[in-house]
Structures are given as C-alpha cells and as structure tokens.
C-alpha cells in the first residue's frame, strides 16, 4: 500500500502555497503558466519570468481570477507541476486540504475537486477550509471562543472582509481590488505624467520601493519603458508622488468599503473588534504603512500579520497537525457535488 501523504494548498491569485506534512515544510511558487496553443512552455516561477516579455503568440497568465479558478485544466497542470517538485512520487489517495473562498456554488466546488482528481492528480481526498478561518487560525485567533474578530485579507486581485464570532462567519464581503489593481494604477499614472509605458512587474517594484502611505518622501527611481510618442525605449526617473497617487486610489477604495462594512456590524461585536483590533493579512499588506493608513481612515486599530500571503497555508498547517482543529475542514466528494 503506498504511503498516504497530506498537503495543505492555497491556490491564491498570484502564487501557489503548498504545505507538505510528510516533509513538514511549506513551498511557494508563482501561479503562472506559459503556453502556445495546446503546448505548455513553462510553469510557475519560470513562467513568471516570461510574463510581459513573451512574444504575442505565447500566452502567460494565471489560471486564477479574483480568488476563483478561471481555467480548470491549466490550474491542474500548474498544481501538478508544483507537487512533482515537492514529491517526485506522489502516490495515490493523498489528503488535500484546500483554502477556499466563502459561499461557493456547487460548480465552483466541483472545480476544486477536479483539480485534485483530474487527469494528472487522482484518487485524492479533498477537504475544504474557508479562507477567513485559515487566516484567523494562522494569526492566533480562535474562531470558536471569541465574541467577535474581524479578518481582512488584501490579496493580489481582491480584498475580503470577514467577521467571526461563536464559531462561524456571520458577515463577509469581497471587493475586486488588490495588489494587481494598484500596479495597474501606477502604470496609468506613469503613462499620464511621463508619457511612458511600463509593465506591471516594474510597477510592483516601484510600489514596494517608493510606496509610503501617509509619508510623502522626496524620492525617485529610474525605470525603463516605452515612449508613448516615439515608440522607442526611454529611461525616466519616476517620483514617489506619482507612485503614491496611483496607490491611493485603490487603498482609499478599500478603506471606504471597509468603513461601510464596519457600519453594518452589530454594536456589541463592533465593540469587541475595536477592543482587540482588526487582523490584517494578505500579500498586498507588504505595502509600507498600510496598517497605519487604514487605522487613521477607519478609526480602528490593526494587527498586521507578518505572514502576508502565506497566512492561509499556515492556517491549513495548523489544521493538519492538530486533530481538534480538523472540524474546520469539510470533506468533499464527487457524490455530494
């Protein structure tokens, strides 16, 4: 009988995170795939290196969109390639714990089931854990024994607000604003101010280096882009003011939606949230000073997690390793779908 293996998997929008119980280690790789027609050219980090550099006949993108599986076949290939890097012999009948969005339809659940039981990965048992629960467990919040906790995850393409109390999520909201929209806003600002076209990868680097919410520094970085008028490559020094203008539009939208969301919460739960602070996580929270900016906008204190995009997979690790926490994992079978 082959050795049964257990994995915690967070597909994510930007990167796949996998925890292997057998190896007791977490792995992270870009959730990207490069293909030409039916031919797969590169997967993972290798595909990301081709992003915005590949010729027109080669497509490079993520199989995920706004936290959901957008292309089932490509997502299965991407996950399979990552699993093979972790364990050369995958075996049959592994237990796979997926971090999944809230309120999925049966069709969306079927997509997750088929990712683990398709053409390349087979005979695996699938368990689903709601993403806010996984984030909460990773940050030390006990969803069952609390009077009210709020978890905010700012991801690559979306931001999700969730309130947990008495062992359940009582209210949740997802908006289509995240790190990718910030990068695109920076590209738009640079094009408007300097008549220079840059890629989202360059914009992301500018965001992390120059982005300072509420702390306007006189700083600049040189970038190379395409001149909008001549069509030739040109070097330009991009100011921190321009970068922050692009970021602010997205962050203000997140903050405004968060404030509206907080107004819908019952007063007694809102009091408890204000008392312990809002838990903030997600890959886009790497943006410097984002917790302080959101605190000044909403009037609530924030607990910024240092796990960033790995919080969900760390929560899955806790569930896999602690038998008492496995009640948060819901088994999914083909018959139930």
Image (cartoon, rainbow, N blue to C red):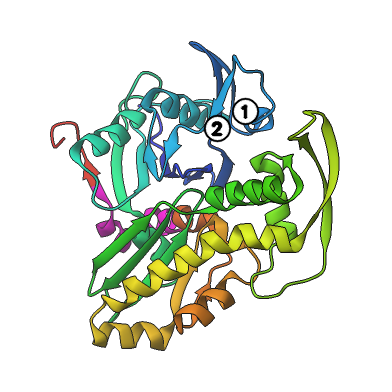
Q: Report the residue at 44% width, 72% height from top.
A: 140
Q: Element type at marker 1?
A: helix
Q: Nearer the viewer, residue 34 or 176?
A: 176
Q: Element type at marker 2?
A: loop
Dot 2 or dot 1: first in sequence order is: 2
Neighbour class for label 1 at 10 Å: few (<14), some, many (≥20)?
Answer: many
Q: Report the residue at 23% width, 81% height from top.
A: 266
Q: Which residue is mark 1?
A: 47
The answer to whether residue 130 is seen in the rendering is: yes
Pinpoint residue 205: horizontal percent, then vertical percent: 72, 50
Q: Which residue is mark 2?
A: 32
Pinpoint residue 17: horizontal percent, then vertical percent: 51, 45
Main SS, magenta residues:
helix
Q: Nearer the viewer, residue 322 or 28?
A: 28
Q: Nearer the viewer, residue 5 or 242?
A: 242
- In the displayed structure, 188 sits above or below 334; it is below
Pinpoint residue 216: horizontal percent, then vertical percent: 73, 72
Neighbour class for label 2 at 10 Å: few (<14), some, many (≥20)?
Answer: many
* Highlighted magenta segment, given as a residue range: 315-330
The answer to whether residue 307 is seen in the rendering is: no
- Residue furthest out toward the left: 335
Is 327 contained in the magenta span? yes
Pinpoint residue 332: horizontal percent, then vertical percent: 22, 40
Relative to 166, 78 lies left or right: right
Residue 288 falls in which quadrant of the image? bottom right
- In the displayed structure, 228 sits above or below 213; it is above
- In the displayed structure, 290 sits above or below 56; it is below
| The C terminus, quarter of image | top left
Q: Report the residue at 42% width, 39% height from top.
A: 65
């Amino acid at each position: 009988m082959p050795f049964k293996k257990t994995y915690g998997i967070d597909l994510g929008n930007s990167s796949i995170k996998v925890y292997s119980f057998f190896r007791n280690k977490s792995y992270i790789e870009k959730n990207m795939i490069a293909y030409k027609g039916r031919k797969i050219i590169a997967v993972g980090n290798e595909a990301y290196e081709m992003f915005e550099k590949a010729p027109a006949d080669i497509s490079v993108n993520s199989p995920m969109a706004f936290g959901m599986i957008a292309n089932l076949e490509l997502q299965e290939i991407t996950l399979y390639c990552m699993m093979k890097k972790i364990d050369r012999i995958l075996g049959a009948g592994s237990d796979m714990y997926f971090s999944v969005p809230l309120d999925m339809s049966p069709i969306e659940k079927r997509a997750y089931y088929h990712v683990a039981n398709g053409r390349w990965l087979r005979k695996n048992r699938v368990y689903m854990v709601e993403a806010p629960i996984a984030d909460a467990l990773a940050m030390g919040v006990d969803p069952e024994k609390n009077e009210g906790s709020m978890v905010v995850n700012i991801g690559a393409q979306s931001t999700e607000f969730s309130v947990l109390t008495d062992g359940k999520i009582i209210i949740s909201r997802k908006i289509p604003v995240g790190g990718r929209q910030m990068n695109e806003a920076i590209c738009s600002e640079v094009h408007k101010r300097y008549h220079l076209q840059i890629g989202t990868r360059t914009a992301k680097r500018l965001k992390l280096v120059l982005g300072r919410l509420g702390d306007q520094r006189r700083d600049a970085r040189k970038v190379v882009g395409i001149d909008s008028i001549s069509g030739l490559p040109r070097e330009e020094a991009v100011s921190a003011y321009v970068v922050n203008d692009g970021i602010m539009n997205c962050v203000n939208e997140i903050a405004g939606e968060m404030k509206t969301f907080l107004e819908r919460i019952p007063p007694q739960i809102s009091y408890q949230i204000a008392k312990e602070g809002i838990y903030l996580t997600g890959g886009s929270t790497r943006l410097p000073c984002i917790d302080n900016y959101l605190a000044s906008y909403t009037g609530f204190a924030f607990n910024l997690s240092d796990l960033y995009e790995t919080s969900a997979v760390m929560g899955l690790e806790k569930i896999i390793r602690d038998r008492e926490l496995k009640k948060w994992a819901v088994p999914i079978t083909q018959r139930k779908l």
